[in-house]
Amino acid sequence: MCTLQVELLDADGLELPCSGMLWILCLVLCGLLAGTRADPGALLRLGMDIMNHEVQSAMEESHILEKMAAEASNPQPGAKAIKGLSNMKVKDVLEPVITLNFVPGVGIFQCVSTGMTITGKSFTGGNMEINVVQNITATNRLLQDEETGTPMFRSEGCEVILVSVKTNLPNNKAISKFVDSTLRKVLPGLMCPAIDAVLVYVNKKWTKLTEPMPVDQMGTVKYALTAPPVTTASHIQVDFSPVVQLQESQVIQLATNGSAPEFPEDAAKGSQLLLSASFLTAELALLQKSLEVNLNDKRVGKLSHTTRTLAGFIPKVAKTYHKPKPLLIKVKINKAPKVTMKAGKSLVHLHGSLEMFVARRHGKHPKSLFLLETHLGLETHYSVNENRLQMATSMDSLLSLSRVSSSIGNFNETKLTDFITDYLQKTYIPVVNGVLHVGLPLPDLLAINYNLAELDIVEGALVLGLKME
């Protein structure tokens, strides 16, 4: 049975001799300094469910206990012999039981319960067999690698605690002393390196975290850490200040609204990833040019909308075009797309212009009918596929519509609201969804399978509830 041992340490740093008004001044200055760091665009909470899974997987993948036992059974030339013991072999290693506990401000306290059989010839000349069950405990301190900027664990204070010892040797003081001495010499050198080796496997699963990930051919996203990870009593929290960058090296700044994103107070326990609306907005800016539609854009299919349909809203069209002519559109996005989120609903706002044309025969250039300034609100649904965030939109509303120019005279553009909304849903929305199909990259760490996540739209953010397979 493993028990948690916590050592309280003094915080490193300077002690400020503040008193009275000076103390108040110190508090104000500290608050100002704390506010200067970049607000995170994404937050990650790693609960014990994921950490247990990762450490257990690392132990199984590495086969480290079996490897350590094999090395102990085949000592290298020049290795120091254990007095009174020869032909030592280690076998029958029991499957380890791993217990983890978060240590606030430090990392994870780890206890590995396992057992094995140690055989050999003892100083008495007979065959010796020791069956031992032990707990290996260590504190895995969570740090940030100075070179790569990625989180990493480092083992500290490894101890081996004997739970039970059984031997085939006679029960007397000399034998007990020999067995105790043998175990104290063998076990720490055998078991503590196993803890370090497991952490090597876990740390490898952080290494890709800060690497730039492509968004189609338009740019990259890199999940840079805002600050070193923080361990609480219930989880590890990693704050990200993502770097969103166009191919031409221009960095897209995340908008700040004065308040950093936070997990909802009633958020479910366990592992979660929060993506702020401002971060998703910055990512969509990479795709802004792809959201524009030109006259000859093959992504827009042929539809039944003609000048006859339009004449039902603008009678002047029927006078100019007696026979029905196909309609074409040109969409330009004047501002970067913006994502807004309220509980249960998310919109992508597109500010731009829509120009309507009439197709003409004999290779003649289409004739412009009118140019409108538009503000589209697209309802957005989120999912995850192949560990990338997918977005699918539909027309929610035409939030504003104003006429800029017209070749068919004045008309009341508000009467076109239903017509334009229906036209865009059938012609333009498929183009938008085709662009968004590239997906947005999610943090690559600890082999997390985001495909299993449960998604929830909250105020100002999207929350992914992470689950293990």
Image (tube, rainbow, N blue to C red):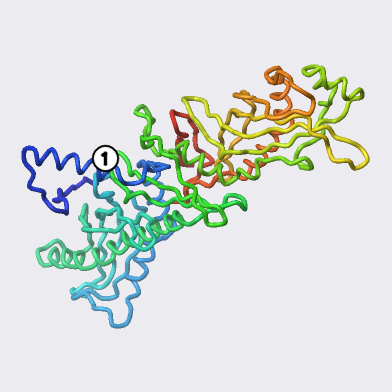
Side of 155 where 84 appears, left or right: left
Side of 48 where 401 appears, left or right: right
**To which quarter of the image does residue 358 belong?**
top right
Side of 291 where 69 appears, left or right: left
Return the residue nearer the eye: 410 or 163. 410
Quarter of the figure with the N terminus: top left
Residue 344 in the image: above or below residue 2: above
The residue wearing badge 1 is 233
| Residue 134 appears in the picture as rendered | no
Residue 334, position as x, y percentages in the image: 61, 38
Return the residue nearer the eye: 189 or 398. 398
Name which residue type carries label 1.
Ala
Residue 452 in the image: above or below residue 70: above
Q: Secondary structure at mark 1?
A: loop
Return the residue nearer the eye: 332 or 386. 332
Residue 119 in the image: above or below residue 155: below
Query: Badge 1: how crowded within 10 Å, few (<14), some, or many (20+)?
Result: few
Query: What is the total number of numbered labels drawn onto the structure image?
Result: 1
Residue 301 in the image: above or below residue 163: above
Side of 186 where 40 appears, left or right: right
| Residue 148 appears in the picture as rendered | yes
**To which quarter of the image does residue 156 belong?**
bottom left
Residue 378, position as x, y percentages in the image: 60, 29
Residue 458, position as x, y percentages in the image: 45, 29
Residue 81, position as x, y percentages in the image: 23, 77
Residue at the bottom extreme of this rendering: 78
Identify the residue at horizontal 31%, vertical 59% (top origin): 195
